[in-house]
Amino acid sequence: MTEHELRARIQDIPDPCSLATGVPLGIGEMGLIQSVACTEGKVTVRLHITSPMCMMAAYFMREIEQRLTGQEGVASVHVEFDQELQWTPGDIQPEARERLAAKRITMLGGRLLSRDAAKPERVTG
């Protein structure tokens, strides 16, 4: 499988924190997927976490392993987590930020969305 195909299989894994806000987002929309690599059938997925208090690491690991294990060309799956907390709300895809803003959610993972990032753009015409 290509990196694109692997990403496609995991990008819509729901982020439980976004589910709790009433604006369900996948880990792809949240910008949590840092990298996906496949070398000789060994897949490594590196994820960002939104907070040092994130309790969802085991959930993400299980979901990723379940979706990728057994796929053609995948011999093993390893999930790593970014311990430097490099994720910021700016990593959320613009369309997803607009959905959050429409619900007036300005904080996610303990981090404040900037006014500009949280505010949907107005379309005039």
Image (spheres, rainbow, N blue to C red):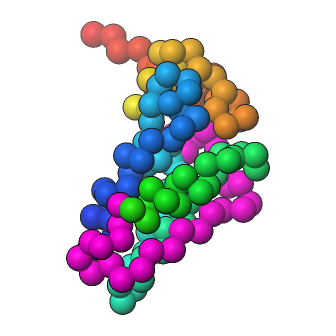
Q: Residue at x 72, y 62 (%)?
A: 83
In the rendered image, residue 9, in percent from the top left (x then y), is placed at: 31, 57
In the rendered image, residue 61, in percent from the top left (x then y), is placed at: 53, 61
In the figure, 50 relative to 103: above or below?
below
Residue 70 belongs to the span the image colors magenta: yes
Can residue 87 be seen? no
Q: Is residue 85 left or right of residue 36?
A: right
Q: Residue at x 61, y 38 (%)?
A: 89
Q: Residue furthest left?
A: 72
In this view, the residue in front, 25 or 124, is 25
Give the magenta-colored segment's residue range: 67-92
Q: Residue at x 61, y 49 (%)?
A: 56
Residue 96 belongs to the span the image colors magenta: no
Q: Residue furthest bottom?
A: 40
In the figure, 12 relative to 106: above or below?
below
Q: Is residue 7 left or right of residue 99?
A: left
In the figure, 59 relative to 76: above or below?
above
